Image (tube, helix red, strand yellow):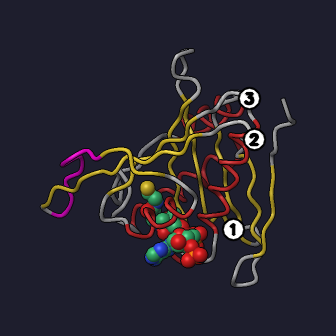
Amino acid sequence: MAERITQREHVLRNGQRLTVREAVPADAAQTIAHLRQAAGETNHLSFGPGEYSTPLEHQQMMISEMAIKPNCLFLVGEADGEMVSMLTFTSGVRARKAHQGEFGLTVVQSHWGQGIGEFMLRYLIDWSRQNGVTRKINLRVLVTNAAGIALYRKLGFEEEGRIRRETFLDGQFVDTLLMGLCIDPD
Ligand SMILES: CC(C)(COP(=O)(O)OP(=O)(O)OC[C@H]1O[C@@H](n2cnc3c(N)ncnc32)[C@H](O)[C@@H]1OP(=O)(O)O)[C@@H](O)C(=O)NCCC(=O)NCCS
């Protein structure tokens, strides 16, 4: 198995330097703050403003546990040192499900359109090709999330299904699109 990649750098369209690396427990408070901020900036997450209530110790534990699993990934993206993006990829525990997982991705609104989401996702795809376990990446996206769907299509994800009425938002039901990317050896 190739050595696990743990950090990548990229110059953004606005000239800032983006560093993408695996989270460590000391990042826990900032990751919670990031998710709370994201919840207030978009309607496209599974939680709304004030709803991300995971305690600090749980977040620290989650980061530690994911770091030692070969098929899980917790990434943070920092632009000139400020946390602007997060990606988590969680896989099945049992042997029959360990080859597949689902990710969640956020970028703060001030940094949308800079290429960060794409860079984070390319990291996940490259890492998946090298971790020796992952053969399928899944995601769920609200059908109203045009930016997200465009990003996932751009990177080769295909639509595999639709869950009707999975979300209730602003008085209306919203469907979820299931998308996936198969990971095969080069
Ligand atoms: C969806 C999201 C992750 C995209 O991240 P981003 O860093 O803004 O996207 P990027 O700049 O990397 O864009 C990459 C590609 O995505 C697509 N894209 C991004 N924003 C778009 C928009 N507003 N409209 C249409 N396509 C868009 C384009 O194909 C783009 O490629 P291009 O730059 O060559 O045109 C970001 O908007 C976000 O965090 N939104 C709120 C939370 C969320 O929706 N998370 C995903 C839940 S499934």
Quick one: label 2 or label 3, which is nearer the N terminus? 3
Q: Which residue is mark 1?
A: 82
Give the extent of the magenta segment.
162-170
Give residue 7's position: percent from left, percent from top.
Answer: 81, 52
Q: Amino acid at mark 3?
A: Gly
Quick one: label 2 or label 1, which is nearer the N terminus? 1
Is 4 located above or below residue 17 in the figure? above
109 and 182: which is toward the camera = 182
Helix, strand, or loop for circle 3?
loop
Q: Is residue 10 visible?
A: yes
Q: What residue is at 35 percent from the left and 60 percent from the top?
A: 49
| Residue lying furthest right | 3
Q: Is residue 113 visible?
A: no
| For residue 7, side relative to residue 90 (left or right) | right
Q: Which residue is mark 2?
A: 186
Q: What residue is at 50 percent from the left and 59 percent from the top?
A: 152
Give residue 151's position: percent from left, percent from top.
Answer: 51, 65
Q: Quadrant of the N terminus?
A: top right
| For residue 160, side relative to residue 123 (left or right) | left
Give residue 125's position: percent from left, percent from top.
Answer: 66, 48
Q: Quadrant of residue 145?
A: bottom left
